[in-house]
Image (spheres, grey):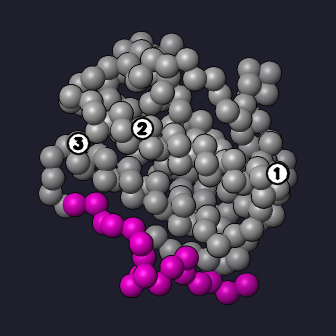
Amino acid sequence: MSSSLFVDPEDDPRVEPPTRADERTMLVEFLRWQRDTLELKCGGLDAADLARRAVPPSTLSLLGLVRHLAEVERAWFRRVMAGHDAPPLFYSEAELDADFDGATPDSDCVARAWDAWRSEVAFADQFVAEAPDLDVTGNHPRRGPVSLRWVLTHMLEEYARHNGHVDLLRQRIDGAVGE
């Protein structure tokens, strides 16, 4: 399997984050870049490839990561920041890893994951856009009060870490590499 790029640099649909901007814009645009990267690197794959597991005994897969990141968006923006009663979509207290374990090579499972992820991203984007400032706080059950600034920074870390997993998983599937 030879290496190829996810996308030719001239055709990359992602918009580079600004090199100079206010703090909110910078955080939002870097997070958008990370989200777009997830979507780009999962693009063009069928349900079987998206659900392909890393290596036994791991249940890590691209589809599992999409489901997991939908849950992460939901937890931080709906539950913690907005204070909504928003139960998990893909896992439960009895099955904490179901976001990964339940990622099956089924087109309905894939569609549901992407729909959930896009819905949670849209909610998060609207919440951030409507927040008066980055000092708005939500309440985390273990950490206590957390600011929107902290959540956005944490989301950048979360996506960057998982996009590293995405790089390895995608390269294993078809050799595709790139930023």
Q: Which mark is residue 24?
A: 3
Looking at numbered disc 3 in the image, what kind of residue is underneath it? Arg
Quadrant assignment, res 4: bottom right
Percent coordinates x, y for residue 37 in the rendering? 48, 62
Identify the element where label 2 is drawn: helix
Q: Give the range drawn in magenta.
A: 1-18
Which residue is drawn at the image coordinates 69% and 47% (left, top)? Answer: 112
Indicate which label's residue lies in the foreground, 3 or 2.
2
Query: Dot 1: within a 10 Å radius of its alpha carbon, few (fewer than 14), some, or many (20 or more) residues?
Result: some
**Apparent side of residue 3 relative to residue 109 in the rendered image (left or right):** left
Q: Mark 2 points at which residue?
A: 124
Q: Residue 57 carries which label?
A: none
Identify the element where label 3 is drawn: helix
**98 falls in the magenta region:** no
Which residue is drawn at the image coordinates 47% and 44% (left, top)? Answer: 121
Quadrant assignment, res 90: top right
